């Protein structure tokens, strides 16, 4: 946790397997638990609330025991003491509560997804899966699911004039293991915008282990031999929350209209691509400062003499020849 270590708590469903050891949580089948920062589960107030916008959540997972039809999940869910409470909902209709599937995984597959529930509509979702070469139960896979791997989820946001994160632009999920990595990205900022306000202080972390079925969106159609796995556990450990380390760079307009700013001398006169130009500078528009263009800043006609004896410091570093010169109509000539 940013600012140092902090003791966290989890409480699973009654009669289900859930154990902790140091920084690790081990969860058995058909269970779920919210992460709280106090030993109290009487209401959502006790959940750990984090400012995710512009920050990162990372943790380690081991799903080596999870079969094709099982799902180990870590989520961010919209939480309150009303419709989006952590109480069991029974047979009532699914509440309109936003969620981010940080990761749902087993040995054979993995998925990450977002469901903003914008305006009460929870049917819209975007998801991503790694390829079978990138993720699977073999040392030949980029991520070998027989071993621990790290999950890092970054919530890239733009800053306002006060350097505060204000708008979600991209969610980037990176799986890493022994120097190898796979990155899954959702950069549909229009779709993600509905999550902006919810990622400030209204989403809590929940860990889950459930039966996904023999055909699911995590690992697809399960092989017959693995159709009936049940009761396996997974581990999630070393949870780490940080802030202000996922800042998006503003997109520059395709056709900038700001003020033209003249910078340093260009490395070569040829960069201005103007046969009449005698002075070329780097430049950019004020609303697109990282897009460098080249502008001719001098059309004076010069008379050229011998090579410059000052080592070429007055010319561009990439100009092949640097000549002693003066304006053609200057009566002082070389003394100007």
Image (tube, grey):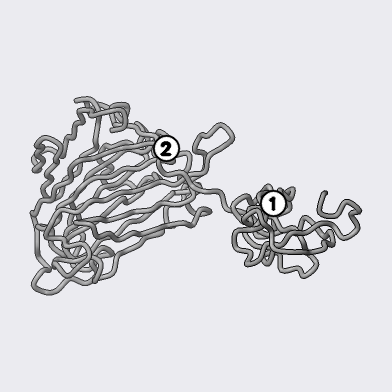
Return the mark for residue 141: none
Would you say 279 lies left or right of 316 here? right
Would you say 277 lies left or right of 161 here? right
Q: How crowded is mark 1: few (under 14 residues within 10 Å), some or many (20 or more)?
A: some
Mark 1, residue position: 285
Labelled pair 1, 2 in contact (Cβ < 8 Å)? no
247 to 220, vertically: above or below? above
Q: Is mark 2 on a helix, strand or loop?
A: loop
* Residue most extreme to the bottom: 224
Q: Residue at x 43, y 41 (%)?
A: 54
Residue 243 in percent (x, y) is at 38, 36
Q: How far apart are marks 1 and 2 (CA)?
A: 28 Å
Q: Can residue 282 be seen in this view?
A: no
Q: Which residue is drawn at 49% across and 54% down?
A: 191
Q: What element carries label 1?
A: strand
Mark 2, residue position: 244
Q: Quadrant of the N terminus?
A: top left
């Amino acid at each position: 946790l940013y600012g140092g270590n902090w003791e966290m708590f989890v409480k699973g469903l009654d009669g289900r397997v859930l154990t902790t050891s140091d920084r690790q949580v081990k969860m058995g089948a058909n269970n779920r638990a919210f992460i709280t920062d106090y030993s109290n589960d009487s209401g959502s107030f006790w959940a750990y609330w984090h400012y995710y916008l512009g920050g990162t959540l990372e943790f380690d997972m081991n799903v080596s025991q999870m079969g094709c039809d099982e799902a180990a999940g870590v989520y961010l869910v919209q939480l309150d003491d009303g419709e989006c409470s952590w109480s069991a909902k029974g047979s009532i209709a699914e509440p309109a509560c936003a969620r981010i599937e940080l990761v749902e995984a087993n040995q054979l597959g993995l998925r990450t997804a977002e469901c903003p529930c914008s305006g009460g509509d929870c049917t819209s979702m975007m998801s991503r899966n790694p390829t079978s070469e990138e993720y699977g139960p073999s040392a030949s896979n980029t991520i070998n699911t027989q071993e621990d791997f790290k999950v890092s989820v970054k919530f890239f946001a733009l800053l306002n004039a006060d350097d505060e994160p204000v708008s979600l632009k991209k969610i980037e999920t990176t799986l890493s293991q022994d120097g190898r990595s796979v990155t899954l990205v959702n950069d549909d900022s229009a779709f993600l915008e509905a999550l902006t306000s919810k990622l400030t202080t209204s989403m809590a972390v929940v860990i889950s282990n459930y039966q996904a079925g023999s055909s699911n969106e995590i690992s697809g159609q399960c092989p017959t031999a693995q159709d009936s796995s049940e009761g396996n556990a997974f581990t999630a450990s070393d949870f780490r929350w940080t802030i202000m380390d996922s800042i998006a760079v503003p997109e520059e307009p395709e056709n900038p209209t700001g003020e033209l700013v003249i910078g340093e001398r260009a490395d070569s006169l040829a960069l201005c691509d103007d046969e009449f130009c005698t002075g070329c500078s780097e430049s950019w528009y004020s609303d697109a400062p990282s897009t460098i263009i080249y502008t001719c800043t001098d059309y004076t006609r010069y008379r050229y003499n011998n090579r410059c004896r000052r080592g070429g410091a007055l010319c561009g570093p990439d100009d092949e020849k640097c000549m002693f010169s003066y304006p053609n109509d200057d009566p002082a000539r070389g003394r100007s």
